[in-house]
Image: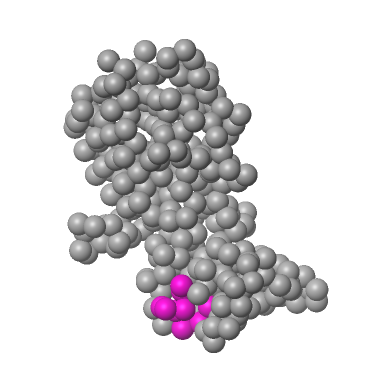
Amino acid sequence: MEKMIIIGTGCAGLTAAIYAARANFNPLVLEGHEPGGQLSTTTLVENFPGFPEGIDGPQLIMNMKSQAERFGARFQFSTVNGFEPKEGHVRVLVDDAWVETETLIVASGASAKWLGLAGEKEAVGHGLTSCATCDGAFYRNVPVCVIGGGDSAAEEANFLTRFASKVYLIHRRDALRASKIMADRVLANPKVEPVWNTVPTEYVRNAEGEMKGLKIKNLLTGEEKELEVACVFVAIGHTPNTKAFKGALDMDEEGYLLQHEGTKTNIPGVFAAGDVADKKYRQAITAAGQGCAAALEAEKYLAERE
């Protein structure tokens, strides 16, 4: 029987691990298919407090992991495939074996949806990203593009006009799916040029591997051309990593975990932190804050049981 299991090693999971380990719970931290979460694909983080010159995303993750290990957190490369509440505790299916635990912090994050084009994985962090608030400031006075048609795409395109010289908004239909107020706002921005009925077909990168353009195809005319852009922002949504908890933990219609009174879920002793529950902010610092809160609430839960 474990005292505490933490699922996920992004900012939420690692912060929870630091707090839980310092409280002498010796937590078991499970690293899934994306160790380090989305920060592990970010080349430079400039908005995490305490690093005036910025820090590489993978380095920040390694620092946090080392900090948790120093206090006694244990790390295991495993995937959680199932979950069951039991009498007075819960258990999780870790790879192919059930592991019992008194408390569980779910910080498994959300995975950005990508386009599936050739060379996509290698381009992430080199002019391909899914977060305008994270990376927009790196692309001042250069043209960029946003792919998508919902509220997120409209919001990201508007945000990017603070930095970029021009923002192409590429959508496969002839009208945005975004709410009317968001659509009107972005289409009224003189820096935004909508590119309707169009899909991306190929990333174009320079000899150093950095993005320099995007090939696109008009679905009505079949015309193909290349846009000169320094960065491609993909805004077609995220998928919360909650498959193992369906039917047991409360979720919204998109699969994000619902939090009650802080980071509590509907199952006693189970807490949710970070992007697995937060679809509004999705920032490293907010995820870290929720990881801290989840660990403190789990600690309180264990103390009350004893």
The residue located at (38%, 51%) in the rendering is 39
The residue located at (30%, 61%) in the rendering is 47
The residue located at (25%, 36%) in the rendering is 18
Q: Position of residue 176 (x, y in %)?
A: 67, 70
Residue 303's place in the image compared with 219, above or below, is: above
Q: Position of residue 96 (x, y in %)?
A: 52, 18
Residue 215's place in the image compared with 66, above or below, is: below
Nearer-the-camera pick, 200 or 71: 71
Q: Position of residue 70 (x, y in %)?
A: 19, 32
Nearer-the-camera pick, 116 or 111: 111
- Whether residue 30 is in magenta: the answer is no
Q: Is residue 137 visible?
A: yes
From which residue to which does the magenta span run?
Answer: 159-168
The residue furthest bottom is 190
Please state, as top left, top right, bottom left or bottom right, where the N terminus lies in the image.
Answer: top left
Please state, as top left, top right, bottom left or bottom right, where the C terminus lies in the image.
Answer: top left
Query: Which image quarter: residue 300?
Result: top left
Query: Which image quarter: residue 171?
Result: bottom right
- Image side of residue 62 versus residue 191, left or right: left
- Image side of residue 71 versus residue 209, left or right: left
Query: Which image quarter: residue 210?
Result: bottom left
Q: Position of residue 74 (x, y in %)?
A: 30, 26
Nearer-the-camera pick, 272 or 57: 272
Q: How many marks?
A: 0
Q: Is residue 107 visible?
A: no
